[in-house]
Image: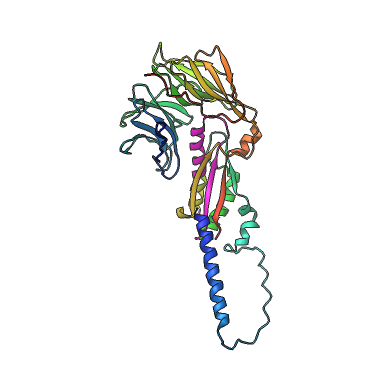
Amino acid sequence: MNTSVRALLIALSCAVAVGCAKKEEVRPEPTPAPTPTPTPTPTAPAGDNWTDVALLASKPCLVARTAYFDYDASNVRSEAQEMIRCHARWLQNNPGARMTLEGNADERGSREYNLGLGERRGNAVRDLLLANGASSAQINVVSYGEERPVCTMSDDSCWSKNRRTEIVYTVKQ
Amino acid sequence: MHEVSTGSRRRLTSYKGINGAPAFSPDGRQMALTLSKDGNPDIYVMDIASGRLNRVASHYSIDTEPAWMPNGQEILFTSDRAGKPQIYRVSAAGGGSVSRVTSVGDYNTRANVSFDGRKIAMVQGNKNVYRIAVLDRERSDTGTVRVITSGPLDESPSFAPNASMVLYAAREGNRGVLYAASADGLVKQKLTFGDGDVREPAWGPFRPR
């Protein structure tokens, strides 16, 4: 809902801008001599500019967006911590950025308990983000429990893929 | 809440976080439910007419899956406050102490109570097999536990109104299917009705009064 409203607003403001631009053109003022349009500057290679949105798609620790968990556990494993700190740095450098953390559980056991487990896994990632510089207004946590598996076989390999928190950016910058 | 007789619906809760596991009290005037609006799932009892909420179980762990005892005075719920999920009991009026009901195993969840309060069905699991167990409190308060299904992914037990059978959902391939087992575990039968995914079965409340 929010995103669609936002998209609509963006679309509207574009339309308004275009309208204004046309009006400007109609004005009978001497147009300045046409200068050759500068060739668009090539987007800078994503370096360490932590506000360059291209970084989100190029820096390995920002491209990784899933933290996995042990059975019936919600502590963040050591191998996911660097990735989460990396996203925390992004949030810190981009105060307008927003994300939803989607917590999930494997199919074993009861559904409502798994809903709680998914939420706790989302909260665990949130807490680590907050401890590393993100602000709470940037993060929303939702749990899908066992209802959104990425892998549907009933075995250990699938279960381990389903016990996860996914980072989903709703606003990138 | 969906009013079956009139078809009308109204939303009872829309808090941030989990709004789940609703369970009507035996007299239909209250609803026990799980809300995580304060940061983690806790058990609440709502007076349906007024919408007033009373938190009856609160802990930083997961508290969920409330089930009413037939007298309407107590609620069973799942909590992992001791590290692993187990079933606990608390006064439905709140303020009382919380006592642990299950003692065997690492995973006992989703209690469902027989009409006479003597039997409690639950999901009992370890990492590999999740089965339905019945805690029979007929002879002692701690009771005896009998596993009545074979797993591996059984869930959502629901006692028949006369407590002789337990409906539950089992997993076959990628489908949930409906089963019924006798409360003593001697008889088990699959109930088929075509395709589709079965989850969270419950006995209908429509019985002659």
The answer to whether residue A105 is magenta is yes
- Tell me: residue A51, above or below residue A20: above
Residue B131 image position (x, y, % from top left): 55, 22
Count of labels shown? 0
Left or right position of A153 against B74: right
Q: Residue furthest front?
A: B6
Residue B69 image position (x, y, % from top left): 37, 23
- Tell me: residue A27, above or below residue B187: below
- Tell me: residue A127, above or below residue A30: above
- Tell me: residue B20, above or below residue B131: below
The part of the image, by quadrant, that contains residue B205 is top left
Locate the C terminus of chain A by quadrant. bottom right
The answer to whether residue B56 is magenta is no
Residue A3 image position (x, y, % from top left): 52, 55
Q: Which residues are magenta?
A: A96-123
User: Residue shown at 61%/35% (left/top)?
Assistant: A159
User: Residue shown at 30%/38% (left/top)?
Assistant: B50
The part of the image, by quadrant, that contains residue A165 is top right
User: Residue shown at 57%/46% (left/top)?
Assistant: A166
